[in-house]
Amino acid sequence: MCEDTCSHIHGIDISHYQGDIFWEAVGENSKMTFVYIKATEGDTRIDQRYKENIDMAHRYGLKVGSYHFYRARAPQQQQLENFMVQCRPGDQDLIPMIDVENNAGMGPEELCDSLLKFLHLVENPDRKPVAGFLRAEVMRPDTDGFQPVPDRFLSSEMDIPCRNKDFLRSRFLCYAKPVHTPEEATSFIASIKQKHWDARHNCSAYILREGGIKRFSDDGEPQGTAGMPILDVLEKSEVTDVCVVITRYFGGILLGAGGLVRAYSHSATLALEAGEVITMVKCAQCELTCDYTLYGRIPALIAEHDGKETGTDFTDNVTVRFTLPEDNVAPFQAKLTELSSGKYQVSVTGNDFFEMDL
């Protein structure tokens, strides 16, 4: 209970369970400045006193916000639509909230996944304008007050917000980018540190195919709680030539070693899930010169052996350049020998890793 001389901002939350509210007493309390009112519950329920409570709260000069009572096993899309219909932007002074009071028999991870899916629906940028109110007001506490959750960018450079209930008070931003050299990786890390110069930590890890290089940095977090978990996610995902940087804005609550490991691991996982992981296969760079009669059959022969054309020159003959998975060069030559009665040979001019659709 606060003393009369405290400087805190006071408010209450109400629903139909409170029955008749003595609004005169609430309004006369000089320290009572806001009220959160239950609007909906689950996918179909509407609080029977919602509109009445909003009108009375405004009449007595209180700031009003609405909340939805989340039911983890109820259909999420219907829950959101139920809340959106009742929570009218013109009635609100405060950001809408989601109230989670029970786990519906779910374990912590299952409940967390359920909430993340619901938040993804709330933040969907393609939703009709009526949901813009909800999307614009989904916030996280930060050092400078409430800040909007950033959007996802599904590209080679991603800004993925980490939203795990175990560390909501800290804000985690995860960036992932393809890199091929240590210089590219360190330059990328430096650019993120410059972008988020005011963050408490910018932790990172990267894996390079060339030389089998693996590096990580805790950047001030307790040893083994940040960089190593990020690297562990990259290794278990069997990705390479990638760098991940996770920026943490401290939220005032110490997460402990276990909490930090979960936070950084989850952030790295979100980045990889949001990005497009491509499969690279070691291929032979091949070249074949043949007459125009045989050339008509070459493109199909290349495709049949999982190859890709990279260039063609037309002169007196046709020279075709293409890539083949290394294991497919011999079968390709055998088929070519059969088609040309041994007249033509494929030349291997080099090898490298190329993107393949498997």
Image: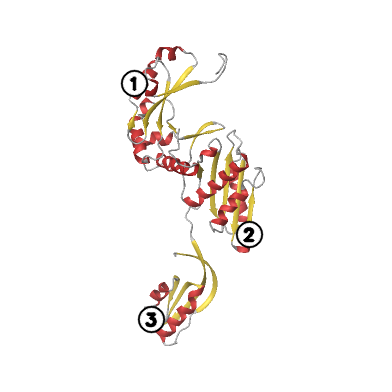
Residue underneath mark 3: 292
- Residue 351 position in % (x across, y down): 54, 71
* SS under mark 1: helix
Between disc 1 and disc 2, the foreground one is 1
Residue 86 as seen in the image, left or right of residue 105: left
User: In the rendered view of the protein, which quadrant contains the N terminus?
Assistant: top right
* Residue occupied by mark 1: 52
At 35% from the left edge and 29% from the top edge, which residue is drawn?
88
Q: Residues within 10 Å of mark 3 (few under 14, many from 20)?
A: some
338 with respect to 205 (left or right): left
The residue positioned farthest toward the front in the image shown:
105
Report crowding for label 2: few under 14, some 14 to 19, many 20 or more residues within 10 A (C-alpha): few
- Residue flagged by tag 3: what amino acid is it? Tyr
- Identify the residue position indicated by label 2 in the image: 213
Q: Amino acid at mark 2?
A: Ile
Residue at point 39% right, 81% down?
A: 294
Nearer the camera: disc 2 or disc 3: 2
Q: Amino acid at mark 1?
A: Glu
Q: Give the vertical position of 345 relative to 192 (above or below).
A: below
Mark 2 and mark 3: span between their CA atoms?
46 Å
